[in-house]
Amino acid sequence: MSDTPGRLPELLAEYAEVETALADPEVHSDQQRARDLGRRFAELAPIRAAATELETARDDLEAARELAGEDASFAVEADALVVRIDELEERLRRLLLPKDPNDAKDVILEVKAGEGGEESALFAGDLLRMYLRYAERLGWQTEVLDDEPTDLGGKKSVTIAVRARKPTDAVWAHLKYEGGVHRVQRVPATESQGRIHTSAAGVVVLPEADEVDVEIDPNDLRIDVYRSSGPGGQSVNTTDSAVRITHIPTGTVVSMQNEKSQLQNREAGLRVLRARLLAAAQDAAESAASDARRSQVRTVDRSERVRTYNFPENRISDHRVGFKAYNLDQVLDGALDDVIAALRQADTEALLSGSS
């Protein structure tokens, strides 16, 4: 296997080390370490499988060529193995492409209404439902961390956590492309003349940070409490349970009011704060990450759109990769697989062209 990419021996050695570690019962007494090892094992297993299959195919090709002079059927087998080896080498090349270090992480996803008033808030609610249904289809866990509903049932702002159930789920790897401005074209429920309106909602996707990823000094935090409010500004709680956390060194502010308990809102706020600080640190450290973040929401207007949802034509269009489909009703019910697959494929092709 000397002509396979140079990183392969190192990764196969790591696979063996991780496999041995996971077989040690003591490792599983540390849940975080066991979870990290499980994620890494899930990342390395396909590489190991492809490398093993490739090695076997090469051995079979050598044997078939030796026997081809005695039996013509082995010559046919050799030709088939040459094709198979080319396919396996390409698969391995793709598997060995540089990975986003966040791919195995869980996600904090925020949806915010933008221009368009109540119609934008209703669309933000539709996007929330779409992501919740998509997560449900894939067996992921979801938790609403913060929710600001409107009088008509829309969402001014909503924040959810999306978590994997298995190490192979790779939540960030699927949802990281969702960040940006999403535009909707439809006749609003509030429109009496039947005219089509265009409005927008913004989505921000952050990799959820573990405590070991981001250490927060309690002395760097200012925590204010206040009374949470519901649609129309009415109070939904008679106690000061809502929490506003300010990270003084960076000026990052997170507000949470979804839970009735001040402690629960504080814990949820710290999760979101950790995710934002991790994303900011990665942006500062990696120019590529910075470029990716710039594609997400800065101002939720209609000019920075990544995707359009056209209700009259039942069409969804992703403007980054030219994806278009006419099953908008299914997409909004969680059938995001095709559009996300197109985005992931485009990402892979860009990496391949850059590595060639």
Image (spheres, rainbow, N blue to C red):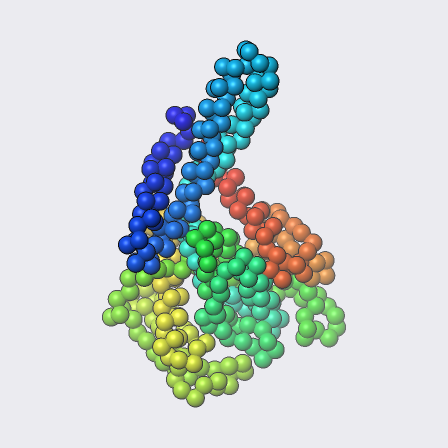
Residue 290 visible somewhere in the drawing: no
User: Considering the image in quadrants, where does the N terminus appear?
Assistant: top left
Q: Residue furthest bottom?
A: 238
Above or below, comparing residue 74 to residue 178 in the picture: above
Q: Nearer the viewer, residue 100 or 61?
A: 61
Where in the figure is residue 345, as x and y percent of width and height?
54, 43
Q: Residue furthest top?
A: 69
Q: Residue at x 55, y 20 (%)?
A: 78
Residue 247 visible somewhere in the drawing: yes
97 sits left or right of 220 in the view: right
Q: Residue 278: which quarter of the image?
A: bottom left
Q: Nearer the viewer, residue 320 or 11?
A: 11
Above or below, comparing residue 24 to residue 110 in the picture: above
Above or below, comparing residue 309 to residue 8 in the picture: below
Where in the figure is residue 231, as x and y percent of width and height?
54, 81
Q: Nearer the viewer, residue 55 or 308?
A: 55
Count how many numbered circles sit on residues in the image: 0
Q: Residue at x 57, y 17 (%)?
A: 75
Q: Nearer the viewer, residue 230 or 41?
A: 41
Q: Residue 268: which quarter of the image?
A: bottom left
Q: Residue at x 42, y 74 (%)?
A: 256
Q: Residue furthest right?
A: 193
Q: Residue at x 54, y 68 (%)?
A: 113
300 sits left or right of 221 in the view: right
Where in the figure is residue 124, as x and y percent of width and height?
57, 67
Where in the figure is residue 20, as x and y percent of width and height?
32, 44
